[in-house]
Amino acid sequence: MTEKQATATIETAVGNMTVEFFLDKAPKHVENFLSLAKKGFYDKTRFHRVIPGFMIQGGDPNTKEDNSASWGTGGPGYSVDAEFNDVHHERGVLSMARSSDPNSAGSQFFVVHGEAGFLDNQYPAFGKVVDGFEALDAIANAPCKPGGEGSQPVEPVQVVRVTVNE
């Protein structure tokens, strides 16, 4: 696969987002995402954290269950070492979520909805949305529950499937 051919479609209940990957910037994270997608890992997960103007977060296998208390804590059972890079976190950038440990990224990812330059060189950006900004906006602007940081959607949007386009 050449860099321009490395794309995937994130099919959601509110529309599709096509992402193109930065193989030269974060090859381990691209490989991890594509491998999980090909196995169906992301199918039927939900976007569980949404902050309009900032980002939408998904990729947690725990979101396949209705018990939202565990959402945001799941992963594939391993982590990928950080590949921080010079990609600017702006609208449409696909990046890996992690805990306070820089090397804790596993399956959870986020798509930047607005300007988030404060994340530059701290989170592995590994792709960008090239089509489907309407879906990004629909997810980011969905109503969220009050309490905490107010980022849990009232009706979390489901990822129907992620298809790797080869």
Image: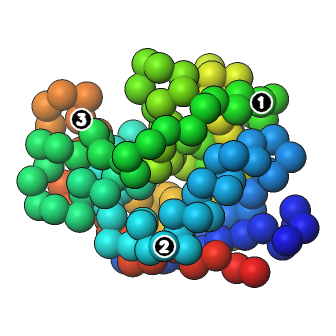
**Residue at figure coordinates x 49%, y 58% from the top left:** 137
Say which mark, if any, is on residue 85.
1
Secondary-structure class at tag 3: loop
Q: Nearer the viewer, mark 2 or mark 3?
A: 2
The quarter of the rendered structure image containing the N terminus is bottom right
Q: Earlier in the sequence, mark 3 or mark 1?
A: 1
Label 2 secondary element: loop
The picture places residue 163, in percent across and down from the top left corner, at 57, 78
Contact, mark 1 vs mark 2 (Cβ under 8 Å): no
Residue shown at the point (48%, 73%) measured from the top left: 39
Q: In x, y percent, where is residue 53? A: 50, 39
Where is residue 11? Give x, y as percent: 49, 76
Query: How packed is label 3: few (under 14 Cα within 10 Å), some, or many (20 or more)?
Result: some
The residue nearer to you, when weighing 141 against 28, is 28
**Residue 14 visible in image:** no
Give how far apart the Cα atoms at labels 1 and 2 are.
27 Å
Q: Amino acid at mark 2?
A: Lys
* Residue at mark 2 to residue at mark 3: CA–CA distance: 32 Å
Rendered image quadrant of residue 20: bottom right
Q: Residues within 10 Å of mark 2 (few under 14, many from 20)?
A: few
Nearest to the observer: residue 43 or residue 131: 43
Q: Quadrant of the C terminus?
A: bottom right
Pointers 2 and 3 in contact (C-beta within 8 Å): no
Q: Earlier in the sequence, mark 2 or mark 3?
A: 2
Tell me where residue 33 sits by quadrant.
bottom right
- The number of numbered discs placed on residues in the rendered structure image is 3
Q: Which residue is mark 3?
A: 150
* Placement of 131 over or under 108, stated as above or below: below
Q: Which residue is mark 2?
A: 39
Question: Which amino acid type is marked by label 3?
Answer: Gly
Left/right of residue 82 with respect to residue 39 in the rendered view: right
